[in-house]
Amino acid sequence: MIATIEGIEILEEAEQLAKILAHSDIAIQYTNAKRKLQEDSKAQDLIAEFSRLKERYEEVQRFGKYHPDYTTVSTDIRVLKRTMDLHETVAEYKRSEQELEKLLNEISSIVAGKVSKNIKVPTGNPFFDNLSCGGGCGSGGSCGCG
């Protein structure tokens, strides 16, 4: 728990940033897309069907290609996943979710970078995650301690 006046001020600033983010166009688009997804009965049916088939898929995967239904279930889940991902409401939700995540990752990177260039922040992008300092001091990594 941060008990200093400076710590309290930092938390208050973080609260302000959270309010700004919550009222941003990207967050509003995400909230609207999520609501539409929850209200779209066809999308909900596809999601429910995918969840049921995913359980079956996981069961089949335990035995791999030796399971008698391996090929059928593997094909069925790929087809259903594609159908679900191409459904307009699901696709809109995923796009808005990715945009919001991208914004949050960018903010996290900016904040961490202002504190120290050695702070690693997951970006959700393996390419950029691998460019950051790995392991810290004494790990043999490329980052210097400073």
Image (tube, grey):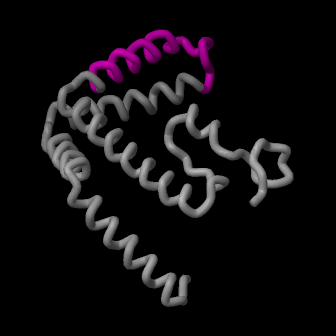
Q: Residue at x 49, y 14 (%)?
A: 69
Above or below: residue 110 compared with residue 70: below
Q: Which residues are magenta?
A: 62-84
Q: Residue at x 45, y 77 (%)?
A: 10
Q: Residue at x 77, y 51 (%)?
A: 144
Quadrant in the picture for the N terminus: bottom right
Residue 87 occupies quadrant: top left
Residue 77 is one of the magenta-drawn residues? yes
Residue 88 occupies quadrant: top left
Q: Position of residue 66 (x, y in %)?
A: 62, 12
Q: Position of residue 31 (x, y in %)?
A: 21, 51
45 horizontally vs 55: left or right: left
Above or below: residue 133 compared with residue 65: below
98 horizontally vs 89: left or right: right
101 horizontally vs 88: left or right: right
Figure disc tally: 0
Instruction: Give the main secondary structure, helix, strand or loop, of the magenta stretch.
Output: helix
Above or below: residue 100 compared with residue 108: above
Above or below: residue 137 compared with residue 41: below
Q: Position of residue 33 (x, y in %)?
A: 19, 43
Q: Position of residue 131 (x, y in %)?
A: 63, 37
Quadrant in the picture for the C terminus: bottom right
Residue 140 is one of the magenta-drawn residues? no
Q: Residue at x 35, y 15 (%)?
A: 79
96 horizontally vs 81: left or right: left
Front residue of 39 and 121 = 121
